[in-house]
Structure formats: structure tokens, C-alpha cells
Amino acid sequence: MSKISDEYGSLVFNDQVMQERLPKATYRVLSQTVKEGKPLNLEVANIVAHAMKEWAIELGATHYTHWFQPLTGITSEKHDSFISPQGSGRILLSFSGKELIQGEPDASSFPSGGLRATFEARGYTAWDPTSYAFIKDEVLCIPTAFVSYTGEALDKKTPLLRSMDAISREAKRVLALFNKQVTTVSTTVGPEQEYFLIKESDYQERLDLILTGRTLFGADPCKGQELEEHYFGAIRPTVNRFMQELDDELWKLGIPAKTKHNEVAPSQHELAPVFLTTNAAVDANLLTMELMRKLASHHGLVCLQHEKPFAGINGNGKHNNWSISADDANLLDPGSTPDENLQFLVFLTAVIKAVDEYQGLLRMSVASAGNDHRLGANEAPPAIISIFLGDELEAIVRSIIDATPYASDGAKTMDLGSPVLPTFIKDNTDRNRTSPFAFTGNKFEFRMPGGEINLSDANMVLNTIVAKALADFADALEGSKNFEVDAKAYMKQVLTDHQRIIFNGNNYGEEWLSEAAKRGLLNLESTPEALPQYIAAESIELFENFGVLNRIEVQSRYEVKLEHYSKKINIEGLVTARMARARFIPAIVEFSATVASSIATKLSISEDMDVSAEEDLLAKLNSGLVTITKGVEALQKAIEVAAALEDSLENARAYRTKVIPAMNAVRAAVDEMEIIVGHDYWPVPTYNHILFYT
Ligand code: ADP
Ligand code: MG
């Protein structure tokens, strides 16, 4: 056996380990509770906890933690050691069932969007037995949900799990109409994580990267990505060593890292794992991101996952490949038999309906200060949601709408569900990289999520809106006497109503903006414009009807997102002002003094000396200094005005419309200076330097 297969999952308390280490009866009860999603009883939990502790200690663990995802999106953990003092200086290592299934972290320091004002301040974490426990840095990590004392979700995982329940329930109703009784329906996700690796020594010189994750200054490099030589190019040896270590560590954690390659931008890379069930995939992605950041330091590198680390250079996205499977059969696979094709088309129709009806909510789910730089910047899809189906599938949809026979390439004619269909779709090579929501053979690829995002929100929304569309189908068709005919008629109606969301053309083009407006599609360009979609009456109704979030939970999440946005921009504004004052202005002053003394020296030698070049330069430096100084004052003022606004939406809007433009003005003035100030005087590493290291 190779080393990889030996080590794969070696740090995970997975099904195999449970089978080996738990008494048969306990294993059976645990498996059953996991399947049925019931809470564990304490007796079983005690036995599981003991086995888990013994296993973890053998692997060098000294602490345990309830690993959870508060509304900030990143993961949180508080480590407790297994040590329990026994008097006379002796200790025992203990871990009880209660400690396994429930924790009580101090909830008061996590954002709750006002939830705690109305509810108990206490929050507790509860083990999610559908995600395996694992060991990270000598700590046994137990994936948990985080809820308030009264049961309101305070985290990202809880509503995601609820949304998986919802779609499972409704998909089963639809499958029952096809006479299929299945045990489990779940959604699957394979996220493609993009990231940059830069030298730690450069990073340390830049306060903007350290505090905001992106460069707030930096003139265009002389060379960008125009030669397209980086994409799939040979990987630098340092980066290769990083990737190897990363793969090793991910595999130990049972994360199926699969492909790695260079991306379009210089110093940019991508990692894609094999897909998993959605909640496991989200956990795995968060761990992957964390490991990337940690392991980079072993190689003198820093990993940047921000959506836009460098202006003018492609940013980091995270394509969310999504599908639905029933007892391991992919429901979005076109299949090869006619009756399965009808089923496929029913599910496809549900996705189309869902995405059109709730386009605003889907857009909202990926809104963040960082992602605002990507969406609509000709590197990622625009902020407008549309669906790419590919030529064949679109022709099929059209044939349903028009009630005409489907003709493939003019050669074969077929009714709905001809066996000819699947091969054509699967082999469709037109990948349309510009579409925000593309059908890619047997799954949808949602391309809007940003590199730094926690994918829970996007998938929670996707699962819920598709659950709703499936429920609508089941409501309409249950009791039908002539299922096939009625199903086709239903699809014809739904596809007619929602065809505006289908767009196979170029999403980056100017024309699409006006075409989309004509179609009545939403174009929510920024986070403050997108977030109110969360609290729209139909969104709250949707989440409540499907048991995913109640009104208060929605409201609190909306508040947290708004606050988070404003805080991020506030920090960026402060860092812009600080760097301008503390680094760039002094550098320009110093260089100006050199130029000025050169003029004085030359003139002292001869009054006739031509000093026009220096004078010209000095004038430019001077004018730059004035512009920067005034710009910083204006920025400071804008921040004060924005920060003083009490209403959280007004507040976020002011950051968007007042603070960001003021920051951009300072940046533009500084970037102009970077080009004319002597290299040795410039106080921070430039794009040329950071992006093209060896
Ligand atoms: P691309 O061509 O877009 O770069 P790949 O074809 O390499 O991407 O696959 C991208 C991702 O899609 C992988 O993470 C893969 O696991 C995922 N994927 C494949 N099938 C499914 C599925 N049924 N459900 C969810 N994700 C899937
Ligand atoms: Mg992709």
C-alpha cells in the first residue's frame, strides 16, 4: 500500500475508526442517530467520547475543542485540555459524553446581530455527528453547531443543515412521483479555491495586506497577465513544495484534494477537491483555507485568499459546483433512458425556476466588501444572475416552451427524453466561463462566490430555493392522473415564465447589461444594494416555510452582514489614511528634497544649467503631495460622517458611496507618485516586485 492510502484520513474519527473502536451496539445506535438526525443520548455519548479521547491521545492530542462557524464566517475554537487534576499532584485524562455533545462558549463576543439583546446571552455548541471529528495541531476538533440558549442559530452551519433537510424532503416528494423511494437525498459541493502565494518578506512590508488582506495602493505592474503564460504553467519549486505539504495534510484530514494548478494571474493558484456532501464540503473548504494560510509560512510565503488582493489583476473566486444526489445517483445527470430524462428535466426546471425567482437572494448570499471588486469586473461574472445551459440543453428547453420536437444538429429528431439527449449534453465543450451559474455536464457551477467566503450561505440559499421549486412541483403534480402529460405541461408553463434567466451569451459584454435590464433581471452591484434582499418579505416567508431560518434569525444575519461590511471598509479607510501619512507622504517629501537640492546644487555651479527636468519633476511631486494630503483629509471626513450614521443600512451605504471613492482618490494620487519617485525611496514593495518573485 502506498503512503497516501495509509495516511488518508488518518487524523479523522471516521466511520471506519468508529467501527473499529466502538462496541457494536454503540456503533449501531450512533449510525442510526446520524442517519435520522436525532440527538445522541448521554449513555451512548459517554462511550463515544471515551473512544474518541483514547484515539486522539494515541495520535498526540492533548486538548479538545468544539469547532464552529460563528456569523463572522471564519471558524472558532477554544481549546480545553483533557487534564483533570486528581489531588496529590496526579492527573487523569478525561473527556465525557456531555463534553462531546455540548459546549458553552462565552457567546457574548461573537456577532449576533442583536439576537442576544432579545434572548439569553448564553449560547451553546452542539456536536454535528454528520461531520467527523478530526485532529488539528494536537487538538481534537469536534464540528459543532452554535445556537443561542433559546435555540436560535448563531452560526452558519445550523441553517445549512436545515436547508439540506428541506431539499431532501421535497426532492423525495418529487421522486415519489416517479415511483422512486430513496433513503437519502443530499446536495453535493465541490469548491474550487483560488489563492495567491507571495513572499512573506513582501507581505510584512505592507500594512494594507496585513490588516485588510488586499493592497490598497500599487501602480499597475509593467507586465500583468496579458501573456497568459501563468495559467497551467509550470509550478515554481517553492510553490510546489507548499502544494505537496498541503496535499499531505489535507489527505490526512480526509479532504480529497484532487487538482492543483497555476491560475491566470501571476502568483495565483487553484485547488479543487473531489466533491462531498454539502456540509462536509463546507467544513473541508474552511479547513483547507486555514491550512493554506498556516502552511504557507513553512515556505516563507503568505497565502492571500481575498477577492481582490491586487487591483487590475484577477482576484480570487471560489466556484461552487453543486448538484443533488439520491442514494448516490446524481439527479442532475441527464442519464441515458427516457424516463430518467423526464426526471432530469423536472429537476433542471426546478433549478431554473428557483434561480429566477430568488435571483436577489442568491446574489445576496455572495455579497461582501471583497467580492464587490470582482463581480462585474470582467474577470468574474457580473452582479446579474443568469443561467448558462449550453446549446443543446437550451434547444431542449426551447422545444418544451414552443411545443416543437427537439432537433439535434438537424440530424435527429426526438421527443422529450430521447436516449440521444444525454451524450450530446455531456460532451458539450462550450464552457462559457463568463456565466455566473453554468450547467457543466452533470452539475451547476455557481461562479459568483468569492475566495474568502464561507460557502454555507450560498448553499443554504441554493438548497432552500430549489427545495421551494421542488415543493411547488410536488404540490402541483401530486394526485395527477396522467403524470407524464401533466408534468410536461407544468414544465412548459414554468420554463415559459422563467426563460428570461437563461443566457448563453457573453456575460462580460456591455450589451448584456441593457439586455438584462430589458428582461427585468436584477443588477445589484454592491453589497449594500444586495443585502436588503435577505429581509425582503418573500425571503423571510421562504426561510420560515422551509424551517431554515425564522424572521429573527434572518434579521440578525442581515444586521451582521451590514455591520461586517461597514467595519471592513472602515478599516480599509483608516489603513489608507495611515499608510498615506506614515509612508507615502514622507517618502515623496524625501525624494522631493533630493530633487530640490539637485536643482540648487546645479544652479550654484552655473545659473545657466538646464534644470527644467528636475523642476518639472519637483512640480509633479509637489502637486501629488498636495492632492494626497487633501485626499487624506477628505477621506478622514468621509469616515467620520459614515461612522456617525446610526442606521446600519445608511451606514453601509455611506461607506460605499462616500468612503470608497475617497479611498480611491488617495490611491490614484499615490499610485501616480509611485511611477515617478525613485525606486530606493518608495517605502513598500511594488506590484512588479510582489507578483514576479522567483
Ligand atoms: P473546472 O473545469 O471548472 O475547473 P473540474 O471539472 O475540475 O472543474 O471540477 C470542478 C469541481 O466540480 C470539482 O471540485 C469536482 O469535485 C466538482 N464536481 C464534480 N461533480 C460534482 C457533483 N456531482 N456535485 C458537486 N460537485 C461536483
Ligand atoms: Mg470551474
Image (cartoon, grey):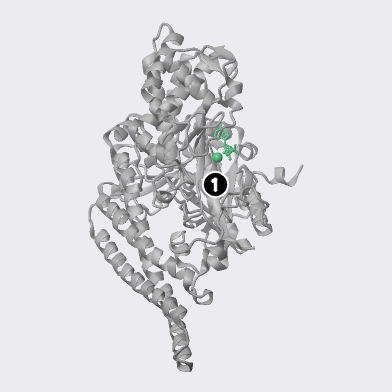
Q: Residue furthest top?
A: 481
Residue 227 drawn at (x, y percent): 60, 52
User: Residue 645: percent from the left, percent from the top?
Assistant: 23, 57
Q: Could you tell whether 569 is left or right of 343 in the image? A: left
In the picture, measured across the screen, residue 576 lies left or right of residue 17, that is left
Disc 1 residue crowd, few under 14, some 14–19, many 20+, Cα 10 Å: many
Residue 376 versus residue 56: which sits nearer the camera? Answer: 376
The vertical placement of 354 against 522, above or below, is above
Q: Which residue is mark 1?
A: 193
Callout count: 1
- Towards the viewer: 295 or 6: 295
- Position of the N terminus, as image quadrant, is top right
What secondary structure is marked by label 1?
Answer: strand
Image coordinates of residue 71 in percent, x first then y, are: 39, 48
- At which x and y percent is residue 594? 47, 83
Observer able to see residue 173: yes
**Quadrant containing ligand 2:** top right
Establish whether ligand 1 lies closer than 8 Å to the Cβ of label 1.
no
Please give the name of the residue rendered at 60% of the width and 18% of the height, measured from the top-left corner.
336
Name which residue type carries label 1.
Gln
262 lies left or right of 217: right
Which residue appears at 49% of the width and 57% of the height?
310
Residue at screen point 38% across, 17% down: 493
Residue found at x 40% / y 30%: 501
Query: Can you see residue 181?
Result: no
State which quarter of the image contains the C terminus.
Answer: bottom right
Q: Nearer the viewer, residue 258 or 100?
A: 258
